[in-house]
Image: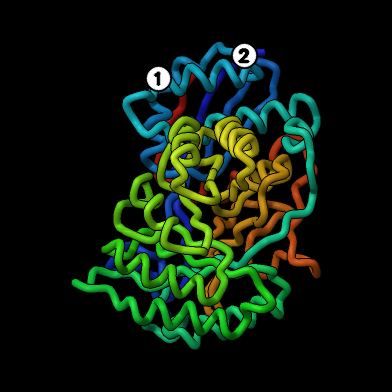
Amino acid sequence: MQISRIESTEFSYPIEDVGSDAGYNLVYEPGATTERKLFGLRIETDEGVTGEFVGGNSPAFAQINTLADNLIGRNPLRRERLWSEMKRALRKYDRMGIGPVDIALWDLAGKHYDTPIHELLGTYRTRLPAYASTYHADDNGGLDSPHAYADFAEECLKIGFPGFKIHGWGGTDERRDIDREIETVHAVGERVGDEMDLMIDPACEYETFGDALKVGRACDDEEFFWYEDPYRDGGISQYAYKKLRQQLDTPLLQTEHIRGLEQHTDFLRNEATDFLRADPAYDGGITGAMKIARMAEGFGIDVEIHSPGPAQRHCMAGIRNSNYYEMALVHPECSNTTPPVYEGEYVDDIDAIDDEGSVPVPDGPGLGVKYDWDYIEENRTGGRTYE
């Protein structure tokens, strides 16, 4: 089998009642519409089997321009060889271009062997416990106060979620209102802390180590499950997070913003985090994410898969040392950010969980989902073909 053609398609879709704050975060904004751009990738072969993936971002697909011509004529089933060569080819960059290609190659392999990806990985489970991961805070009548976050956490508990994660306030104010963040931690903790695992992800908003420490101590008081990417180092300073770990009881979750197996290994080896993050779209595809998970298992550490999606579900299905599927982003007044490109029963939104608070792993060949390519083509904004 040989790769005969690769096609990338850029498209856009609207998210209603969603805008952005001054800090680039998506927030509830009644009447606003955010146009989001994603990409569809198809890898075709001379035997008629096609691997597909929808997701990614513009920087990742710009890197695919470096890779695609060299993939034509190659055996798509030799994923490990191709992964290693793509890693070297993108050595001067962040390597995010590997993810979409690798995921599409896994989808192709599953279709070739007529089996879901999680079975190729070695299935550990087929139901995934999920947590509700919120939009960022707003001042528009949505998640606009500590009390509103507590109300929404209680709503998510009633729906059946076993966990709840806060994305707090952003923006470009000269000084963050850390007291409001602390009040939110306490409000949610006091309301549902005895019944849910709680997390907070400031998404690198806090400007000082001191602010991160203050919020972390509030997390200690409420016995949060994890504390993720607090401040403006961008989530990459091993030294800073080692020092923060020494001051807090709440476990840290880091590595969403670093790329690669070696960097994740170093974060653990240098005692700079308690949980690892991995994302097949960001971290070298399913191949890269699973390498990180196996490495973490050797350290006795859990790896939490970032964001929702079919590739994420298959990865988590093949991992023992993982706790929760991230149902993101959810809000009491607006819909999830998932693109409307899935045909059939696959869905990622606040109502997707079952009575036990879990979501299923697709069981069809490959990723196990069917994409609506008519919708993607109708909303096409660009693309490129390699033959």
**Quadrant of the image containing the N terminus:** top right
86 and 342: which is toward the camera: 86
Residue located at (58% from left, 70% from top): 198
**What is the residue that sits farthest to the front in this orientation?**
246
* Dot 1 amino acid type: Ala
Q: Which residue is mark 2?
A: 75
Residue 245 spot, x, y in % from top left = 44, 56
Where 144 falls versus 247 (above or below)? below
Label 1 sits on a secondary structure element that is helix
Residue 12 spot, x, y in % from top left = 45, 53
**What is the residue that sits farthest to the left in this orientation?**
174
Q: Rounded to the nearest whole Å, what is the CA distance between mark 1 and mark 2?
A: 18 Å
| First in residue order: circle 1 vs circle 2 | 2
Residue located at (58% from left, 57% from top): 340
* Dot 2 amino acid type: Asn
Quadrant of the image occupied by residue 51: top right
265 and 342: which is toward the camera: 265
Check whether the beta carbons of the residues at disc 1 and disc 2 lie within 8 A of each other: no
Looking at the image, residue 64 sits to the left or right of residue 299; the answer is left
Label 2 sits on a secondary structure element that is loop
Q: Which residue is mark 1?
A: 89
Residue located at (37% from left, 24% from top): 91
175 and 383: which is toward the camera: 175
Check residue 215 in the rendering and tell me which mark sits there, or answer none: none
Quadrant of the image occupied by residue 139: bottom left
Where 282 falls versus 142 (above or below)? above
